[in-house]
Image: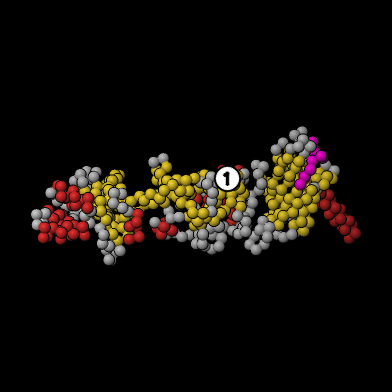
Amino acid sequence: MKRKNIVVGLVVVLLGIFLGWKFLASQPVPTYQVGDLQLEVTLSPNPPRVGDLGLKVKILDQKLQPITSAQVKVSSGMPAMGNMPAMQAEALAQLKGQSYETLLSVSMLGTWNLGLNIKTNDGKTQQANFKFSTGQKGLIFYPDNEPAPMDMSANVSMIKLTGQQIKLARVQASQLKKLPIYRTIRAAGVVAFDQELNVAEQEYLASLNDKSVLALTQSKLKLLGLSQLELERLNNSKQPDQALILPGERAWVYADIYEYENRGVAVGQTATIKSLANPEENFSGVVRAIVPVLDPKTRSSRVRIEVLNAAEKLSPNMYVDVMFNVPLGVKLAIPKAAALITGKNILVYVAKGSGYYERRPVVLGPLAYTQENKEERAVYPLISGLRAGELIVSQANFLLDSQSELSGGTSGLYGSGAKEVENNDQQNN
C-alpha cells in the first residue's frame, strides 16, 4: 500500500512538471515592432540575475518569415553613478537556427541598458532599445526608434529623452541671440507737496534786483534740487512753480534711489510712474534734477521727476512706484526661466538635437529685461558658457534636471545639496 502511494505521488509530480512545461512553452514570446521588422527578444534566466544572461533575438520580416542573414550588434551597459564609472560592452550575436544569440555579463544589481543594432541585406539599419532590471521579468521597450534615455551623473552632463517624453514634458528651446536689454531701477516715490522749494523760488525771484542776496538764494535752490535748466526757466517765467504745491496737468514726483544706483539715473532720462489710486494707468515723467546731497540716514539721493500727463490724478503726498529703465545695449541673453540657480553656480540645458540635452554651467550678468511683442520679458545677459545660435531650454528645464536624478544620476540643482538662492533677483537688481 505504501509503495502504491509513492508511485501515485511520483506520477502526480511528473504530470505536474509536464503540464507546467507545456504551459510555459505555450506562452507567447514578446514581439516588438521596429521599423518594418518584428523582433522576438527573450532573456534567460528571466528575471535576470547577476552573472551570465542569455539573449536570444528572432527577426521576422513583414510576412512574419525569419530573417537569417542579418548582422546583429548588441550593446549593454549601466551609467555612471556616484564614484562608479560607466560600464559598457558590445558583442556580435551569432546565428543559431533561426535566432541570434549571445551572452551578456550582468556584473551587479540594478537597471541595465540594452541596444540592438540590426543591419539587413537590403542595407537598412534598425535600432531597438530596451532596459532590463535584475529581479524583474521582461524588458522595457522604447518604440520610437530613439535610444533609451541616457542616465546622467555628476561626471556626465548629457541626458537623452525620447520623442514621447519631450512631448509630454512640453520641453521648449529657443535660439540664443543678441537682444536689446535694459535694467530696471525701482524706487519708492511721493507726489511733491514742497512748500520749502516753492517759498525758496519766491525768495529767489524777490532777490533778482538785490545782488547782495541773489547768490545766496540761488545756492539754496540748487541745494534743494533745482537744476540750471529749471533756474533759467524760473528767470524767464518770473513765477514760482505752483505744481510743487498744487499738481494739475503737471506734477512733481520725488523718488529716492540708493547711492549705488546713481550711475543708472541721469537728468533727461524718462521714468514710469504707477499709483495704487490709478493702477490701470501709467504716468510718464522726465528726470529734471538729482539732489546733490545724499540723505545721511538712508544713503539715498532724491530724484525730481516732472510728470506732464498727470491729468489731475496725482494728489500731493500720494505714494507712487517709480521705474527707471537703464539701457544696457544689445547683448546675448537667455530667458530667466532657462537658468537653474544653485548655491555654487548657474546651469542651463542646451538642446543638442535628436533628443539629447547637455547640462552646462554658465556665467550670467544681473537680471535685465527686453521687449518682445510689446511685452516685457525677464532675461539674464550672458557673460560666458554658451555660443550664439545654440538652442537653450526655456521651458521644462526643471523636469530635465529631475529626470537626470530619477534615472540614477545627480540633479544639477539639488544633487549637491545646494539650495536655490531665493533672493538672487533682488541682489542682482
Q: Main secondary structure of the magenta part?
A: loop
User: Callout 1 environment at 10 Å: few (<14), some (14 to 19), or many (20+)?
Assistant: some
Q: Residue at x 69, y 52 (%)?
A: 113
Task: Let me know if residue 35 is in the magenta part.
Answer: no
Q: Nearer the viewer, residue 274 or 429?
A: 429
The residue pinned by badge 1 equals: 166
Q: Farthest front residue?
A: 211
Please state which amino acid type lies under the numbered disc 1.
Ile
Q: Which residues are magenta?
A: 65-73
Q: Can you say whether 422 is above or below 164 in the image?
A: below
Instruction: Give the percent coordinates (x, y) of residue 418.
Output: 52, 62
Q: Nearer the viewer, residue 424 or 428?
A: 428
Horizontal relation, residue 417 to residue 422: left or right = right
Q: Residue at x 51, y 62 (%)?
A: 344
Task: Let me know if residue 68 is in the magenta part.
Answer: yes
Q: Residue at x 73, y 50 (%)?
A: 75
Horizontal relation, residue 221 to residue 50: left or right = left
Q: Nearer the viewer, residue 164 or 23?
A: 164
Instruction: Give the percent coordinates (x, y) of residue 12.
Output: 84, 53
Q: Residue at x 11, y 54 (%)?
A: 208
Instruction: Give the percent coordinates (x, y) of residue 222.
Output: 21, 57
Quadrant of the image for the C terminus?
bottom left
Quadrant of the image for the N terminus?
bottom right
Q: Can you say whether 3 is above or below 39 in the image?
A: below
Q: Is residue 29 visible?
A: no
